[in-house]
Image: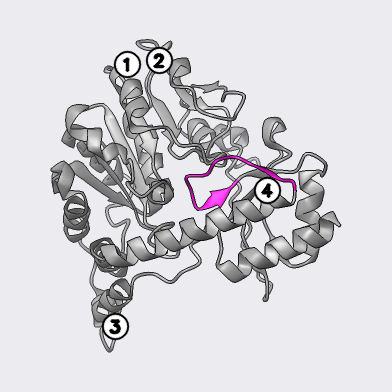
Amino acid sequence: MSQFWSPLVHRLTPYVPGEQPKISGLVKLNTNENPYPPSPRAVAAMQAELGADGANLRLYPDPGADRLKEAVAAHFAEFAITPAQVFVGNGSDEVLAHAFLALLKHDAAILIPDISYSFYPVYCGLYEVEHVAVALGERLEIRVDDYIRHAGKCGGIVIANPNAPTSDLLPLAQIERLVAAHPQSVVVVDEAYIDFAADVVPTAIALVKRHPNLLVIRTLSKSHSLAGLRVGYAVGDSALIEALDRVKDSFNSYPLDRLAIVGAAAALADREHLETTRRAVMKTRAKLVADLESLGFEVLPSAANFIFPRHPQHDAAQLAAKLRERKIIVRHFKAARVSQHLRISIGSDDQCQALVAALREILG
């Protein structure tokens, strides 16, 4: 602490990101990274943009990232999305941050789940947005009726679908119920993990044309294997996008570099690679769930690239510590309702089998 800190800094409780250990030989299943490389087309596009001598890096990127916005719109052409309905930023975290400031900072409190992505309350603290934590149900599910009863009395809603870390998925019809019940407030749906949900991905982008109060935020970090590139985007009514652009251009006109723009655009265009890798993750997830259940774990249904198991006879923190001793890293949260769960990212088949073997040894 310092006398030079502002009062706001003194009040902040910062977000704690997943550990990025600098130890070699780890089985790293704690940060929901995709175990597969990104699209070769994305890599080639970035190499081409860099050029032989890197001369392009002396030039500023397109502040509007129009090429990427066009790629997002094309990716969702079935929903008649236009580039004017797309906002892009430095990872979905930055997109979320701008949404809190541009669309959710009102007199009334916003609603967020009590157990969800822990950046949501952090942004509330940073931007001084009052919030109400709405409790998940007994099965750690988001209950839409608990939000609908606040209709007309809240400044907005932010939910993750699938939720993190619980991996619960709300059907598209329930999302529409929620959005329709709050026509005077912005509803932000964070779809960081939606591509791992099902054979037919139930994205809320399908509802954007019908609901001008809906903003859907997504990332290329998970399903497109580009966590290191930091690209996120939002899709919504053009008036919502204009608000985000006004905040962005008052903060940083160049949030995405030249390589990020071309790499992300190429990744979005490579649907075959996305389909191949997401199905591989889903197949490994099903096998891992079955293996853990055979060891006595209870595993919540997952629509994400992670699972959220607990073992009725073993403390989760101790399990995480014993796995770490065997150079396997998973995520453990201390919040009371989920302190006996572990969040385990879906790695490669070999990584997941190493996890199962270690747990079998630990459990005896």
Q: Secondary structure at mark 3?
A: loop
What crowding class fits label 2: few (fewer than 14 Cα within 10 Å), some (14-19), or many (20 or more)?
some
On screen, residue 147 versus residue 212, left or right, reads: right
The residue mark sitting in front, 1 or 4, is: 4
Residue 178 picture quarter: top left
What secondary structure is found at the residue carrying circle 4? helix
- Residue bearing mark 1: 181
Q: Which residue was labeled with disc 3?
A: 54
Tag 2 secondary structure? helix
Residues at marks 3 and 1, CA–CA distance in whole angstroms = 51 Å
Query: In the image, what residue occupies the spot 69% across and 34% down?
Result: 335
Q: Which residues are magenta?
A: 296-307
Residue 87, given in percent of the width and then of the height, sits at 25, 46
- Residue that appears at 22% across and 39% down: 241
Whole-Å distance between the Cαs marked 2 and 3?
53 Å
Residue located farthest toward the right when viewing the structure as drawn: 364
As measured in the structure, the alpha-carbon distance from the residue carrying label 2 to the one carrying label 1 is 6 Å
Residue 305 magenta-drawn? yes
Q: Pointers 2 and 1 in contact (CB under 8 A)?
A: yes
Question: Tag 2: residue type?
Answer: Ile
Give the residue type that dot 4 points to: Glu
Q: Nearer the viewer, mark 2 or mark 4?
A: 4
- Asked if disc 4 and disc 3 are in contact, CB closer than 8 Å, the reply is no
Crowding near pointer 1: few (<14 within 10 Å), some, many (20+)?
Answer: some
Residue labelled with disc 2: 148
Identify which amino acid the numbered label 1 is placed on: Ala
Frontmost of labels 4 and 3 is 4
* Tag 3: amino acid: Gly
Q: Is residue 304 left or right of residue 249?
A: right
Q: Which mark is residue 293?
A: 4
Q: CA distance from mark 2 to mark 4?
A: 35 Å
The residue lying toward the viewer, choosing from 182 and 97, is 182
